[in-house]
Image (tube, helix red, strand yellow):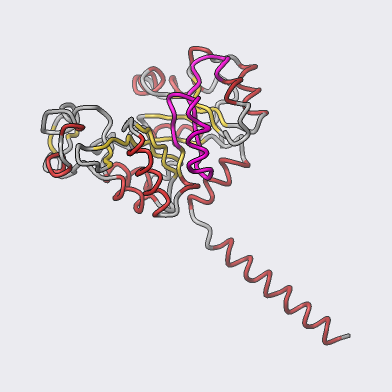
Amino acid sequence: MMGYKLKTTALAFVAFFCATIAIGQSTRADRILEDFYHQPDKILVAAHRAAHQNFAENSIAALEESIRLEVDIVELDVRMTNDSVLVILHDRTVDRTTNGEGKLSEMTFGEARSLRLLHQDQPTEQVIPTLDEVLPIAKDKILIDIDFKANSKEALVKTVELIKKYGMEHQIIFFLYDYKLAPVLHSICPELIIMPRAYKKKDVNNILDWDYIKIIHVDESFYKERLMKKIVDSNVRVWINALGKYDNMEKEEQNSGYSKLFSKKYINVIQTDRPQELIDYLNVTLN
């Protein structure tokens, strides 16, 4: 009997030791996901087009800066070249963000890759990155909000294949402009976090019918406290933008924009062009 007890104790110790090691090996992305699903009071920060105040938007440098700042989510725009390469670019054309001109959809990857990304209208050493390049950089470090702008089934399939290639299904928030596409995407890859955009109260109520939706992109135009509470009470996160209005207010006078934004209750994911300032505000004000 004593031997049995010793053996049981030893097994329990081994189990405890292994569990401790497993906890110690959790990644930063794991910890963000723990907050995402289980800590609704924790406000998550999303960097719009990556942290681009000091770097070209949607660049690898801006992605790496997002990771350095310990942003929770990085928003990246996915498009496809004429020869079916998935790249990260916000606009249909390269005119605004590079030293070139033309529609990306009419360019080969080689042509697009020969351009240099701009920051404050000046060329940088940064080039248009591919989705295949940014995924392994972000793996285990940060969640990615994919703003999917490729607009084709081929591009969608390729995007999901790349996500699966790196085993990052749980690390991706897939933004849908049309919430009615959510069941289609869910059937293709059930592990993805799908974020539909709601344009009115009726959209929210329809989206909440799907139990696999855990975050909704809400427009400020129809913000109502009771509706937001309904979303949060459904264990679903509320994503809203600080872009433009609140970011600009914060730039003009510190704490004016974000304090006004957080007068709205139940918002728990904020997308911003000023991630460092928002993180600093949250650290000082809410912690």
229 horizontally vs 164: left or right = right
Please indicate whether residue 214 sits to the left or right of residue 152 in the image: right
Residue at 39%, 17% (x, y): give it: 245
Where is residue 31 shown, x and y percent of the image?
54, 50
Q: Is residue 146 left or right of residue 42?
A: left
User: Magenta stretch containing residue 195, yes or no?
Assistant: yes
- Pick the front one: 61 or 130: 130
Magenta stretch bounds: 174-203
Q: Quadrant of the N terminus?
A: bottom right
Residue 92: x, y in percent? Answer: 23, 27
- Kindly indicate the quadrant of the structure image that contains residue 59: top left
User: Which residue is painted at 50% across and 47% down in the image?
Assistant: 170
Which residue in the rendered view is the most extreme toward the right?
A: 1
Q: Is residue 189 visible?
A: yes
Quadrant in which the C terminus is drawn: top right
Q: Is residue 240 above or below residue 130?
A: above
Residue 193 magenta-highlighted: yes
**Residue 276 visible in rendering:** no
In terms of depth relative to the viewer, which is nearer, 132 or 127? 132
The residue closer to the viewer here, 177 or 22, is 177
